[in-house]
Amino acid sequence: MLSRKRKLFYYKLFSLFSVVRGYNILIIVIAQYLAAKFILAPKESFMEIILDWNLHALIIASAVAIAGGYIINNFYDAEKDLINRPRKSMLDRLVSQRTKITVYFILNFISAGIASLVSFRAFIFFSAYIFGIWFYSHKMKKIPFLGNLTSAFLAITPFFAVFIYYGNLYSVIFVHATFLFLLILIREFIKDLENIKGDLVQNYKTIPVMYGEKVSKGLITFATMIAVSVTVLLLSQYDTGYMRYYFYGSIVLLIFSVIILYKSNTKPQYLLLHNILKFIIVSGVFSIPLLNIEAILDKITRVL
């Protein structure tokens, strides 16, 4: 049988994994690799992708920086999470706040150090990204609407490191990025409704706290309408291959979410909406190989 100290060590390790949300980071890493192969460098072979150490370095730097971001966010939200997510919060508290801060700084140094091996520009990019995450966690997240926008922007920022590395900044990529940004923004708005109790107690000036649930639902509806419009644009202007079925499904789920939204007023109902948005985002990641990017690029080339 495991000794008591060893059990405690494993519990703390699992707690730290919970704090950094390792499952979310894994999805982001997979998304970056799939985007690199099927969107940004479709003509490169799998072996060329595997042997591209600069790409690996950028993705590892992203993963480590994101892990650090989750830690600092957890550090500042400790009291609020105790109200909104009591079970998860108790698990997270197995690791002391002092240990979290120590790991946070170590991860940031590792991220910046790995990025510096790629180029000085990569070092500056990730240094700015790390600062942006800290500034958001410390200040911006308590500002209604602007905090939501900042959170959504920071969530997609790691992808721009890979975009810039390959130098493929076609309009279709920005349209896809806009769609992802809107999905994350909608999820952030829903999270504010989900966490309204803790936000009220801790004086977080979120949209539901400041302006009420009705205004918050109106913003979610408006953002959803824009997301659906962007999806229609993608389907009508670009040959998205078999990924079009993902976009059709996304439209249905987004409209369905708005219908549920106006019937929701409890935390479990908002959690359901949150999970629907998460499902759309994760499904989009694994649908990337279905995208007909070569047809899209050929069309853009002919236009140019």
Image (tube, rainbow, N blue to C red):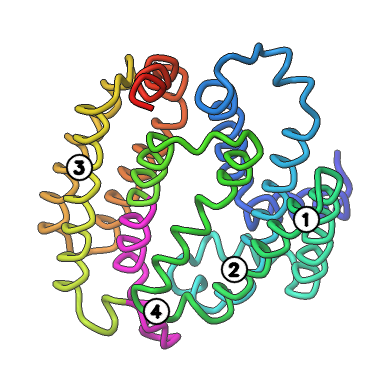
Any mark on residue 123, and which? 1
Q: Hey, what amino acid is under mark 2?
A: Asn
Instruction: Point out residue 153 in the picture as x, y percentages from the top left corner.
Output: 47, 58
Q: In this view of the protein, which residue sits in the foreground, 118 or 281?
A: 118
According to the image, label 4 marks what residue?
199
Instruction: Point out residue 85 in the picture as x, y percentages from the top left corner.
Output: 47, 65
Tell me the magenta residue range: 184-206
User: Which sits earlier in the primary sequence, circle 4 or circle 1?
Assistant: 1
Q: Hey, what amino acid is under mark 4?
A: Asp
Secondary structure mostly seen in magenta is helix
User: Which sits earlier in the primary sequence, circle 3 or circle 4?
Assistant: 4
**Residue at left offset 22%, top offset 35%:** 233
Mark nearer the viewer, 2 or 3? 3
**Residue at left offset 10%, top offset 49%:** 259
Disc 2 is placed on an element classified as helix
Quadrant of image for the N terminus: top right
According to the image, label 3 marks what residue?
228
Mark 4 to mark 1 CA distance (whole Å): 35 Å
